[in-house]
Image: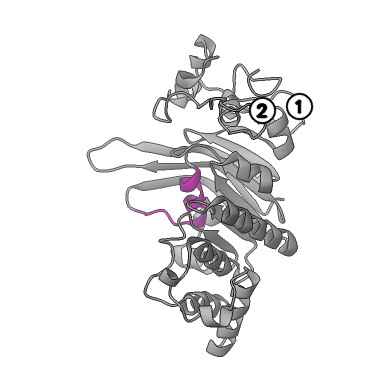
Amino acid sequence: MSLLEVEDLRVRFSRKGGPTTTAVDGVSFSVDAGEVVGLVGESGCGKSVTSLAVMGLLPTRGTEVSGSVRFDGTDLLTLSPGQLAQRRGRDLAMVFQDPMTSLNPVLTLGRQLTEVLRTHTGLSRAAAAREAVDLLGRVGIPDPRRRVGEYPHQLSGGMRQRVLIAIALACSPRLIIADEPTTALDVTIQAQVLDLLTTLVRESGTAMVLITHDLGVVAATCDRVNVLYAGRVVERAGKAELFAQPRHRYTTGLLAAVPRVDAPQGTALQPVPGSVRDLLPWAQGCAFSPRCGFADQSCRSGEIALDGSRPGDGHAARCVHPAERGVGA
């Protein structure tokens, strides 16, 4: 049994007098202990909503969540708010997307770290303060004894992201969800943060769900990858298989749009045409078909299953005309 098993997760938002919007439409994936699983796609594909649903952080008003999210055999969607709050921080932790706004600006770093420790571990004030200093040192923040008394505005974006990681790791959770952890960071700091996260995951056996739109980040960190489009998984595979032989035309489009250092000077990028708003309802066919140069009437003839091209290979795609020879096939 996997540590986290998400089955047929659906999230719908509604407002009075307005239409219902399905942000997550039957997403399923699993994560094993010590494994990094990626959720990949453009903004608006349902990645962050999926993570917030897993953590139980979506607003209750106007939100309908169904399916199952089994963590170590327990369906988190059946827990009461109080029971779920006990799990968050202790067993489940999240590194939020924007390090510039995710920390409380009026509390010191030490206060924000010790609050988590004292809530979930019962440490005394003095013991929690010592542990906070140790955590800041573990994530690579220099002079941690001084930093615990500082406020978020006194740190750079990269240092704030390290503090968020320290808070997430404070109680040695068994699962970490990292939502775009390198957003707004320069390339050098991105590499440092990713290396820190993957090292800590490997050393502790923690499972991690990494949410990103950056396939370079996926290549550097993930073991398995789920590509999302319009709220559904359109392709899932091991990292090596995905990059070597992507099958869904959306995946090949994402890979073709990545700048390559070995491309001749002046080579133009190949963006995916259109936008995520240009879609077809899944009940009518492939949602990506309005943007796909390979689409025909068979792509618009009803539900398309997530099927593997070869039984048992663990590589599946929701595509009528899958690419068989890699990008551009």
Circle 2 residue: 246
User: Please, what is the three-letter code of the amino acid marked with disc 1?
Assistant: Pro
x and y percentages locating residue 135 in the rendered image: 61, 74
Residue 54 covered by magenta stretch: yes
Question: Which disc, if any, is residue 20?
Answer: none
x and y percentages locating residue 75 in the rendered image: 57, 54
Q: Where are the magenta residues, as a range? A: 47-60
**Residue occupying the point 61% across, 16% down:** 321
**Residue occupying the point 71% across, 45% down:** 223
Mark 2: few/some/many CA within 10 Å (<14, 14-19, 20+): many
x and y percentages locating residue 200 in the rendered image: 68, 62
Tell which circle, 2 or 1, labels the residue nearer the N-terminal end: 2
User: Please, what is the three-letter code of the amino acid marked with disc 2?
Assistant: Pro
Mark 1: few/some/many CA within 10 Å (<14, 14-19, 20+): few
> Residue reaching furthest front?
265
Q: Quick check: 69 above or below 143? A: above
x and y percentages locating residue 68 in the rendered image: 55, 47
Circle 1 residue: 311
